[in-house]
Amino acid sequence: MTCVFCEISRKEKPAHIIYEDKDIMVILDINPISKGHLLVIPKEHHEAIQDTPVKTLVKTWVIASAFAKIYRDKLKAPGVNVITNSGSPAGQVVFHFHVHVIPRWEQDGFKKGGRHVLSEEEASEITSMLSDYLDIVKSYLNEISI
């Protein structure tokens, strides 16, 4: 199976590279949501966030955070979205873990719709649903000694 991000990281396909080290590549999205939309991509292939080793996750998110800081503090973007998608229903199109850093500019077309008020019943249901799995969070933190 061919992976476009693997091909880009091996320099088999062209990309606008903003940053690169031995583990991570940051490129411009070819279908940006806004001016400056970046993709932070580990060079090692993992399908999605849940498949990616913790150390790779940490480095990817730290680099994404640094670019968010650049956009907000240095380039004065009014906002920044830092997101990843896992699975087709969540909007994942390229099945290679990556993080989007999307600066938000005035008049860029971003809409805040689709939200609802959280009910006590929904909050209780979600809290109960997640409470049995908090050991996974602890195991991730143990891997990075936090």
Image: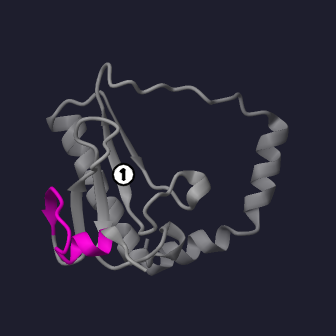
Is residue 49 visible in the rendered image? The answer is yes
Q: Quadrant of residue 120?
A: top right
Residue 74 in the image, given as x and y percentages of width and height: 14, 37
Residue 122 in the image, given as x and y percentages of width and height: 80, 41
**SS for dot 1:** strand
Q: Is residue 59 magenta?
A: no
The answer to whether residue 77 is above or below residue 42 is above
Q: Residue at x 24, y 76 (%)?
A: 23
The answer to whether residue 116 is above or below residue 66 is above
Q: Residues within 10 Å of mark 1 (few under 14, many from 20)?
A: many
Residue 105 in the image, given as x and y percentages of width and height: 28, 27
Q: Residue at x 22, y 66 (%)?
A: 25
53 lies left or right of 126: left
The furthest residue to the top: 107
21 lies left or right of 107: left
120 lies left or right of 110: right
Q: Residue at x 37, y 57 (%)?
A: 99
Q: Residue at x 16, y 64 (%)?
A: 14
Q: Quadrant of residue 62?
A: bottom left
Q: Quadrant of the C terminus?
A: bottom left
Depth check: give the residue in front, 87 or 77. Answer: 87
Say what amino acid the circle numbered 1 marks.
His
Depth check: give the residue in front, 144 or 69. Answer: 69
Q: Which residues are magenta?
A: 5-20
Q: Quadrant of the N terminus?
A: bottom left
The furthest residue to the right: 121
Q: Which residue is mark 1?
A: 100
